[in-house]
């Protein structure tokens, strides 16, 4: 029950943050970044509380070991940070690729390769998360 309450409050907070940011003026970049980072931190804290809480039904039944919660946190952090890093890399590489394609259209294939390499960071994070989950 406690886990459901934490999950519901995290969902409501995320929706409220999204509604606020959709009405925010885009010229206020720092305030938007501040709210996004605050939302990420709140999600991490609430997810940690949900994962470690003794109210998890599988842990209460004895199906999972006591360290399973930390394994779930490790998998989530591995996948989450890898996806954030891949998003930043794709943003930088994509912007540079658009500039190159604007000047030399024949470089499209090369820039797509670099963009694919930047997206590969997220795949590595998901693989590490699956490896962690496989050990639980």
Image (tube, helix red, strand yellow):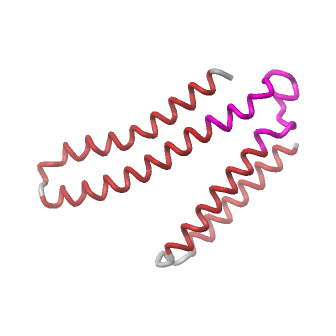
In the picture, the quarter occupied by the N terminus is top right
Residue at x 24% of width, y 58% of height: 98
Displayed quadrant of residue 51: top right
- Find residue 124 and report its horizontal and vertical position in percent: 46, 33
- Find residue 70 and report its horizontal and vertical position in percent: 71, 34
Q: How many marks?
A: 0
Residue at x 73% of width, y 54% of height: 10
Residue at x 12% of width, y 55% of height: 104
- Report the side of 48 relative to 108 (left or right): right
In the rendered image, the vertical position of residue 56 relative to residue 29, given as above or below: above
Main SS class of the magenta portion in the image: helix
Displayed quadrant of residue 9: bottom right
- Find residue 61 and report its horizontal and vertical position in percent: 87, 24
Residue at x 70% of width, y 56% of height: 42
Indicate whether residue 82 is drawn in magenta.
Answer: no
Magenta-drawn segment: 50-75
- Report the side of 62 relative to 21 (left or right): right
- Find residue 118 and report its horizontal and vertical position in percent: 36, 44
In the picture, the quarter occupied by the C terminus is top right
């Amino acid at each position: 029950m406690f886990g459901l309450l934490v999950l519901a409050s995290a969902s409501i907070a995320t929706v409220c943050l999204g509604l606020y940011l959709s009405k925010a003026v885009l010229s206020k970049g720092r305030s938007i970044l501040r709210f996004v980072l605050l939302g990420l931190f709140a999600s991490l804290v609430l997810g940690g509380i949900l994962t470690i809480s003794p109210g998890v039904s599988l842990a209460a039944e004895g199906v999972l070991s006591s360290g399973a919660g930390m394994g779930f946190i490790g998998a989530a952090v591995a996948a989450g940070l890898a996806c954030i890093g891949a998003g930043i890399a794709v943003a930088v590489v994509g912007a540079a690729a658009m500039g190159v394609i604007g000047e030399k259209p024949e470089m499209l294939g090369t820039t797509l390769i670099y963009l694919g390499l930047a997206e590969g960071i997220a795949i590595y994070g998901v693989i590490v998360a699956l490896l962690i989950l496989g050990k639980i």
